[in-house]
Image (cartoon, rainbow, N blue to C red):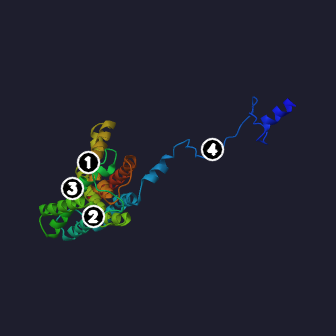
Amino acid sequence: MIRSWFDGLTTSGTDAPPRQTPRFARGDTMAIAVTAPLPALYPAPMLTRLRQSLRVEDALLFGWLVLVQPLIAGLGSGDRFADLSPEDDPLVGLVYLVAAAGAVVALATRSPGESAFDFESFDTPRSYAMMPFMAALALIASIGVENTGIASAEAAFLPVAAVTVVAHVFYNRLPTLAPNKRRVLMAPCVLVGAGIFNGTMAEVLDSVDVGDLFQAAGGDIQVLFGVLALLVLFSLPFYMMFVFAPRQITESEGTWPAWAARYGLFLVGAIAGVGWLAAIGS
């Protein structure tokens, strides 16, 4: 009787059977459900990364350097307007003024949600945009006003500096404009700057034959790398001033590896385009 009472006390309050501890024999397997996504075991292919880094402006600039500008220069038969050479030509000056006006409108607006252009960190490309862009805009505007005869080249620096300072100080009060529209406004400035670079490099290569220089050095591969290094050193500051900075002004995007890939594509296009222009000029 006492034993039956004790058994009822230990099992009262529950109808479930006692919990059994699972035991696994050697060789048994157990499936585990994983809800979190597993990391990729292999990195994306290099071509996929390159395609993801490039934008429409990069393809447009490459086509302009390789095809459009040499074709226009060849059809123009040495006309200064054909290659947009920054010389004394009113039509060329008008093109430069239109490009500068579009860049000023893009500078006087802001994209929704973006903050002012301050130095954020060494790893942020946006921190290095304002001063190179001001220099590029001043150069393009000065060529425009001088070629059209509106004023001297020096007279364009003060208005450009004033607009840049006002846009920087009162950035949060500037009217907003969609990034795509600001990119369209800035595109002529980038293309005109590319014309300046290509024309300058074509004149340099027209006076210095790289092939003869390489042969004179006995085919030394170090000479070839030296020539390429000089081209990179000359084109990188230009790219920062006329391509990187304007595009950062319109839309702050891209990492340093992405911009390195964009610069590589620009360099290939610039070398091909300069070769065409030098051949046409000779």
Residue located beneath label 2 in the image: 173
| Kind of residue at disc 3 | Ala
Q: Secondary structure at mark 2?
A: helix
Of the image marks 1 and 3, the number of the one nearer the N terminus: 3
Question: Whole-percent x and y of residue 47?
Answer: 48, 49
Query: Nearer the viewer's eye, disc 1 or disc 3?
Result: 3
Which residue lies at the image location 81% right of the left edge and 32% below the top edge?
Answer: 6
Question: Whole-percent x and y of residue 37?
Answer: 58, 46
Tag 1–tag 4 contact (CB < 8 Å): no
| Kind of residue at disc 1 | Phe
Horizontal side, residue 67 vs residue 96: left or right: right
Horizontal side, residue 41 vs residue 139: left or right: right
Quadrant of the rendered image containing residue 145 = bottom left
| Kind of residue at disc 4 | Val
Q: Residue lying farthest right? A: 1
Query: Nearer the viewer's eye, disc 1 or disc 4?
Result: 4
Q: Is residue 77 visible?
A: no
Tag 3–tag 2 contact (CB < 8 Å): no
Residue located beneath label 3 in the image: 135
Q: Give the alpha-carbon distance from disc 3 to disc 2, as whole Å.
A: 24 Å
| Kind of residue at disc 2 | Arg
Residue located beneath label 4 in the image: 34
Of the image marks 3 and 2, the number of the one nearer the N terminus: 3
Q: Which of these two is toward me, 17 or 116? A: 17
Quadrant of the rendered image containing residue 8 = top right
Q: Give the alpha-carbon distance from disc 2 to disc 4, as whole Å.
A: 49 Å
Of the image marks 1 and 4, the number of the one nearer the N terminus: 4
Rendered view: 78 above or below 121: below
Query: Nearer the viewer's eye, disc 3 or disc 2?
Result: 2
Residue located beneath label 1 in the image: 234
Q: Secondary structure at mark 3?
A: helix
